[in-house]
Amino acid sequence: MDDQQERTRAPRGFARMDPKRQREIARQGGRAAHRLGLAHEFTPEEARSARAKSLAARALASAVPVPPEPQPQPE
């Protein structure tokens, strides 16, 4: 085989399945995790912290300043 021709690999396993079947399997896994108490649900504070970390990492990677996080409004 020369450099001009590259062999492409056919999808295998989960990647080869119909997308509807993939979603159904993933849905069953999510339900099982919740039923067993192994699933994690983010609190609003955890979600804000994760977003801030993500934005900071992206800013470092692209040298773009991180926008300030909006302050929660008092109720």
Image (tube, rainbow, N blue to C red):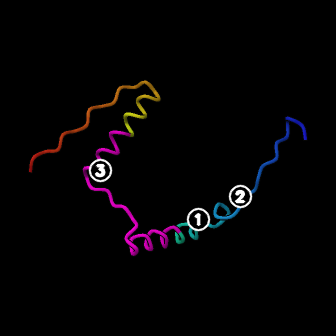
Q: Amino acid at mark 3?
A: Glu
Determine whether the residue tagged by mark 2 lies in a helix, strand or loop: loop
List the residue tagged with mark 1.
19
Q: Which quadrant would residue 19 be assigned to in this image?
A: bottom right
* Residue 44 part of the magenta segment: yes
46 w.r.t. 14: above or below: above
- The percent position of residue 48, horizontal first and vertical second, equals 28, 46
Please give the range of residues in magenta.
Answer: 26-53
The residue closer to the viewer here, 31 or 4, is 31
The answer to whether 31 appears left or right of 46 in the picture is right
* Residue 60 part of the magenta segment: no
Q: Earlier in the sequence, mark 1 or mark 3?
A: 1
CA gap between label 2 and label 1 equals 13 Å
42 w.r.t. 31: above or below: above
In which quadrant of the rendered image does the N terminus lie?
Answer: top right
The residue closer to the viewer here, 55 or 39, is 39
Q: Earlier in the sequence, mark 3 or mark 2?
A: 2
- The percent position of residue 47, horizontal first and vertical second, equals 31, 50
List the residue tagged with mark 3.
46
The answer to whether 18 appears left or right of 44 in the picture is right
- The percent position of residue 61, horizontal first and vertical second, equals 47, 29
Q: Which residue shows up at 40% across the image and 30% down it?
A: 59
Q: Are there few (<14), some (14-19), or many (20+) residues within 10 Å of tag 2?
A: few
Residue 11: mark: 2
CA gap between label 1 and label 3 equals 31 Å
